[in-house]
Every structure is written in structure tokens, then in C-alpha cells.
Image (cartoon, rainbow, N blue to C red):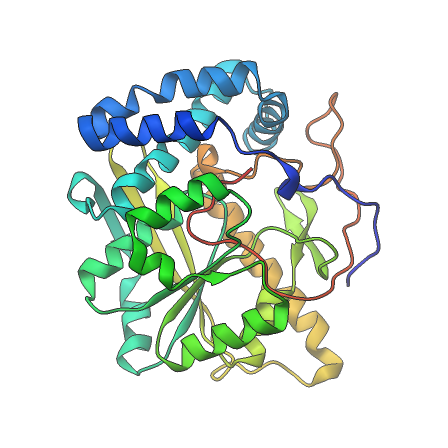
Amino acid sequence: MAAEAKVRPSWKQRPEGGSPAMVRLILAIARGGGRGAARLCLYPIVAYFLCVRAAERRASRAWLSRVQGRPASLWAVARHIHTFSATILDRVFLLGGRMGVFDIDVQGLEHLEALLDQGRGALLFGSHLGSFDALRVLSRRRPGLQVRIVLDRGQNPTLTQIFDSLDPALAAGVIDGAQPGPVIALEIQHALQAGALVALLVDRVHGHEETVAVPFLGHPAQLPLTPWRLAIALHAPVLLCFGLYRGGNRYDLRFEPFLDPLADPPPARAGRAEWLRERVAAYAARLEHHARDAAYNWFNFYDFWNDHDPSDPTGVAAPAPRAAAGVRDGAAGGAGR
């Protein structure tokens, strides 16, 4: 299932966009002038990415060309970057408890509440599609609910420090994804046993992590196996979560029941590899469904298929890295570079 491959440029090595001073200036504008004033800052941010960040600009054009089936214009790339920037800005208000400024349509919450009513914790599998911070609406629907987030604190240190200051309680419950894999798994297990929700993003490959190739937008994409193996090992139910930004102050938050190893146990070891591949392929199909519906919400600004050819953004994917050890993805609506 997994294959040895050439070393791909790591998305983890991408520098943060903008200086810490600029980020703090925008934060001050958001706090002092409100969301409307802060959103005016999005236009120079878009201009900065269009003029300076060539890698993200190329990745945006390649993604939009692939998902829309036609060459993407510079205007479409600008809209894509604006959508990304808007969701990052909205984290200031979501983490700061300013939920009232948003119109969030929630569907599928009954599936999550059924598990919580049984006293069971659950894994929430998200992606770099939209904003995972729309999950904050759960604190209003169900006070006292514990949400633990797997997040590599070292990936975007400036933003992480700022957002931690906005919600210290949430920050205190973060499971640091930079720890060794077994340590992360043990922390997740303890959180689930306490009836918490554990949220992590499962669409990116980390280093030499084991992967499986599944269809995604017509071409094979390598997705990690570690989160799915973790769910099986911990007998944890899995729900998919998508927080899609719809423009203005509107978000759609969707929960989808996906896997319960207790109700649908995996087969014996002989058939487990194929069973896992089928589950990951089914996840990729759901991710594709929502990505086609909200193409500008795709925040993986790098070569997701590892098949980059500047002359053809719809090329065939190359094989992917072999896997190794642990859960290392971020989940708090992570900035998808």
C-alpha cells in the first residue's frame, strides 16, 4: 500500500507570511475597530501574497485549475488568498468568544451529541479545507464540553502565540503535535477516556509517515494512515468535520459520522490493509465532495499531489513517502501553507 518515494519539499519548511509586528498591528485593529475595520487589511495582505509569495500563488493557481477544470485567472487566485486570509482573521473573533458576529449554520450535530450522551469521547477528523475554528460554536451548544486539539505549536509560532493569548483555556488543552508519536497517542487516549473530543487534521503527510494512495480529484493522492490506525487501536468513533467559509460572516459547520470501530470492527490482520485503504478512500471522496463545493476554502498552498509541472497543473501524481511513526498534524483551523 505504501511506497518509497523521492523526498518532496516539506510544507513545514514554508515561512510564515508577514512579520510579527504586522500581525500584531492587524490584531490591534481587529480589537479596536472591530471585524469590519480589520477586514480592510485583507486587501494589502492579498497584494503581498500575489506579489511576494510566488510559491503560494503558483499552488493556488494549480489547485483552482485542477478543481475547476480550466486555467485559473489571477483574479481567482486573489479570491482564493482573500478567503484564506479572512478565515485567519476570523480566528481572532472566534477564539475571543465573539461568536455573535457570525452566522454559523450547523448540520449533523445530533450524531456528535449522541456519542457524548453515551459518555464516549470521539475523534474529529478535519482537513485544511475551511476553518476548524468554527468548532467554537460547540461551546455555546454544550457548555463544559472538552475539546482537545492536536497542534504542532512550532509550525506557526507567531500566530500560535497570539491565538493562545486569545483563549488560554483552549491553549492549555492543546496536545502538542511536535512530541513523539507514542506520547501523542497516550495523551489522546486519556482525553477520550475523559469523554473529550479530540480534533486533528488528517489530510497532510508528515515526513516519512506511512501513506496510502487513493483517488482525489481524478488522480492518486497520498494520505496518511496513522490517524486511522490510531482510531482502531483506541476503539474511538470518528466523525468528519468541515467548517466552510461562505463569505461575509457566514460559515457552514458539518458533522458526518464516519467510523466506529466498536460497531464496525476491522477485519483480521490479513485483510486490514485493504479495509484501511477503503476507509481512507471514502474519506478522500468526502473531502473531494466538499472541496468541489467550496473550492476557495482549500488551504493547502503547496503541491498536494507531489506532481508539480509548471506547464500542466493537472499532471499525474508521483508516489509518496513511506511512513513511520506518529500523529503530528495540527488541528486548530491550521494555516494551510
User: Which picture quadrant has residue 309?
Assistant: top right
Residue 65 on image: x %, y %:
59, 26
Location of residue 72 in the rendering, given as x and y in whole percent from the top left corner = 56, 20
User: Quick one: quadrant of the C terminus?
Assistant: top right
Which of these two is toward me, 178 or 271? Answer: 178
Q: Is residue 81 left or right of residue 177?
A: left
- Taking the image as shown, residue 239 lies to the left or right of residue 35, namely right
For the point 71% across and 53% down, which residue is it?
207
> How far across and how far down the image is residue 255, in percent?
36, 59
Tell me which corner region of the image, top left, top right, bottom left or bottom right, holds residue 162: top left
> Residue sitting at 76 percent across and 38 percent down?
316
Q: Is residue 77 above or below residue 5?
A: above
Q: Would you place residue 45 above or below residue 268 in this image?
A: above
Q: Quadrant of the N terminus?
A: bottom right
Q: Quadrant of residue 274?
A: bottom right
Point 22% across, 33% down: residue: 31
